[in-house]
Image: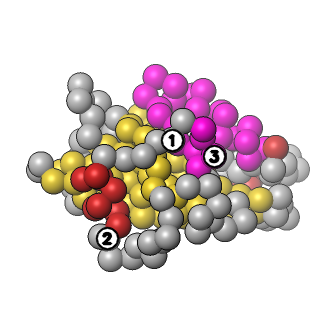
Amino acid sequence: MNKLYLLIALFMFLNNVYAEEFNIEETNLKALPNSVESVVRNSKKFAFAECNLIGKAVNLSDSNNPFEYIITTEPACGWGASAAPVWVVAKINGTYAVLLETTTTAVETIKNKNHGLHQLVETSGTAGHASYTRWGFNGKNYKKLEGYVFLPDDEKLCKAHRDICPFEVGQ
């Protein structure tokens, strides 16, 4: 688990000029503007009516006035053992839209862009597994570019992706 946090810290360091981080356990998450909250609550897959939504503004477009948000539910509402529901919302052509709906622990923007928005990396895990997914914007929503689930005993996968696998493997 410590390697997972180390991996997340490494990504934050390497992308600190471009990166913005979001973690479901951040203490600075706040209530959202009504227009942002309503687009999440009205999305087809929304299943957390009893939960309050919180989040923060992020700059996925590098604009002077960003209109993008990463959102989750208040702590423990709808959460699994190590992850929570997360939505990425942005204003596209003047209207807010849910661009990504996932379950994770952390989301980070990275330098690379697709169709004007930064790519995203989501990470989550426990002592027994770690997941890594990189997303790119296709002009309408975020689509998975690559994804891995690492297990402590999967040396082959970890050796092939040493830069993102949080588990120690032999040389």
- Mark 3 and mark 2 in contact? Answer it, CB < 8 Å: no
- Would you name the residue on which mark 2 appears? 43
**Residue at the image point whose x is 12% and y is 48% from the top:** 94
**Precedes in sequence: disc 1 or disc 2:** 1
Q: Amino acid at mark 3?
A: Glu
Q: Which mark is residue 29?
A: 1
Q: Give the SS element for disc 2.
A: loop
Q: Is residue 170 shown left or right of residue 165?
A: right
Q: Give the SS element for disc 1.
A: loop
Q: Amino acid at mark 1?
A: Leu
Coloring basis for residues: secondary structure
The image shows residue 22 at horizontal and vertical percentages of: 52, 42
- Would you name the residue on which mark 3 appears? 25
The image shows residue 51 at horizontal and vertical percentages of: 50, 65
Q: Amino acid at mark 2?
A: Ser
Label 3 crowding class (10 Å Cα cut-off): few <14, some 14-19, many 20+? some
Q: Which quadrant of the view contains residue 45?
A: bottom left
Q: Give the SS element for disc 3.
A: loop
